[in-house]
Amino acid sequence: MSAATLAEMIAGSFRELHEGSIVKGRILEIKPQVVLVDIGYKSEGAIPANEFEDEDIQVGDEIEVLLEKLENDEGMVVLSKEKAAYKQNWEKIASVFRDGGLVKGKVKSVVKGGLMVNVGVEAFLPGSQIDIIPPKDLNEYVGKVFEFKIVKINDDRKNIVLSRREVIEAERAEQRQKFLDSVAPGDKVEGVVKNITDFGVFVDLNGMDGLLHITDMSWGRLNHPTELVGIGQRLNLVILEVNRDKERVSLGLKQLQNNPWENIETRYPIGQRVKGKVTKLVAYGAFVEVEEGVEGLVHVSELSWVKRIARPSDVLQVGQELEAVVLGINKDERKISLGVRQLDTNPWDDIDERYPVGTKFTRPIRNLTAYGAFVELEEGIDGMIHVSDLSWTRKVNHPSEMLKKGDEVETVVLGIDKANQRISLGMKQIETDPWSEIDNRFKVGDIVKGKVAKIASFGAFVELEGDIDGLIHISQLSEDHVAKVKDVINVGDPVEARVIKVDKVERRVGLSIKAMAYSDAEIQKESAAFEALRPSTDLVGLEQAFKFATEEWRPGQ
């Protein structure tokens, strides 16, 4: 055979080998650093030993390799086992991506924004796509194998983006549908607490989320679901409602227990004494648990017959054991009204025996209001002195004109209203009404002395002996015309005048300065003139006079 023919045969045997292609080779020798492989070319190729780290190889094994270069500077073939696998895997990955299938992969490491995963080739798993609920610690995934969906692939850059979350969601959607098709209201199920909110608990029912509302957790009071359950807790539940269109399931926990309100009226008849524990304090009362799942309300008004309790928390605390009396039951609304004060005798029941009308006593002023003064008879029981019962003679606009808080005053019981728990007291009734004896003290024509107590537009009020006020009408100040009362007389001025009218009914004493030297006949004439003032809008009676006074009168002025 000629040399030319041999060269042609050799060239023909190498014709099928192309750089960048995957070819089959046989392991010739395994060295510490390299593995020598024969691909049927004029020289063997060397592959770094670390490309076989996870494989058990022997001389003679047939392997697939990537032909990177037919001949390097040293005349050897350049081969790669890893690159052959990468090229093969990339083609598989691309095929899976086109078909919408799933790939298995092992998490290699944590990187910025997610995880690196080996699916035959290196791929990126964003943090948001790891699970339905983003994990707190990504390191717990390293070394684990999962199934992934390929969501993005870039052939030029050889980039792959994966999603485990979409795989989980698809599985859960399938599980949800199976669950919804297989259950009905009344079925008992088991689930794990997945999430807790103020209004209830979300339970994982093997891929299906169900809502256990706080009102369906316990027959008793529950301020927050965490008082009964915790994350990860396994619960036995009953299905209350299934909405297949909206994929919603309502769950119940208390429905697995007997309803304690079923025969509530029999167990707690009105008037029965009960013991319980304070579970909650609010502005209007205290909730008391009398048995598991059954609470009653003690309204703040039912805590004491006489004590002034502004807030239940002033006398009670949560957790306190309490005895009470059943006042009423509303089974439909699941309400029990309780009372604590009913354990004691109502001090108002025999109030008229302890304080009969006409009883006199001295007690302190507890409070003042615009219409009267409250006197404390005993703890929690007050009587009221109306402003009109403070004085026989003085027109009192406000009780503070005569009294102040803490003053000890002598009073008399005028009346008792047990139904409304009211006691009427009087101060002026302690003394005789001076107007009942007015005829013996003042007569028309008498000359009297006093001091100006108050000025009004129509005249001046003069304080006379015995705490009686007399009125000098502006027309009785002088023989001359008087335009303004203050032009002639002022508060505090001493006055000497004659009595021209005494009216017991109207409680008025009419005085005149200009009549000081008048005869009896003339005085009678002025008396008639004073009487004629009654219908006048200018004022007549002492009661009305004070309403129109232009200068405020102060006691002691």
Image (cartoon, grey):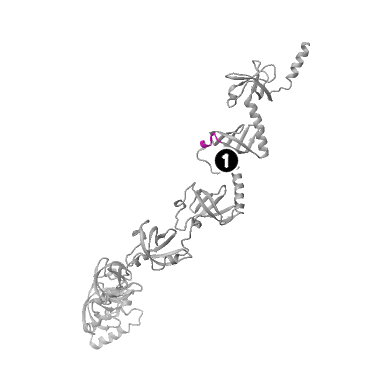
The answer to which quarter of the image holds residue 312 is: bottom left
Q: Residue at x 59, y 18 (%)?
A: 31
Instruction: Please identify the quadrant where the N terminus is shown.
Output: top right
- Left or right of 263 on screen, residue 151: right
Q: Residue furthest top?
A: 2
Q: Position of residue 522 (x, y in %)?
A: 25, 87
Residues 253 and 201: in front is 253
- Left or right of 337 on screen, residue 145: right
- Residue 365 versus residue 132 in the image, above or below: below
Q: Position of residue 536 (x, y in %)?
A: 35, 81
Instruction: Please identify the quadrant where the C terminus is shown.
Output: bottom left
- Left or right of 16 on screen, residue 532: left
Three-letter amino acid code at the position of disc 1: Gln
Q: Residue at x 57, y 40 (%)?
A: 129
Q: Position of residue 320 (x, y in %)?
A: 36, 57
Q: Secondary structure at mark 1?
A: helix
- Residue 373 versus residue 313 in the image, above or below: below
Q: Residue at x 61, y 23 (%)?
A: 57
Residues 417 and 34: in front is 34
Callout 1: few (<14), some (14-19), or many (20+) C-alpha neighbours within 10 Å? many
Q: Position of residue 441 (x, y in %)?
A: 21, 82
Q: Residue furthest bottom?
A: 521
Residues 513 and 438: in front is 438
Residue 513 visible in the displayed image = no
The magenta stretch is 139-144
The answer to which quarter of the image holds residue 144 is: top right
Q: Is residue 153 magenta?
A: no
Residue 99 visible in the displayed image = yes
- Residue 2 versus residue 271 in the image, above or below: above
Residue matched to label 1: 129
The answer to which quarter of the image holds residue 346 is: bottom left
Q: Residue at x 51, y 36 (%)?
A: 139
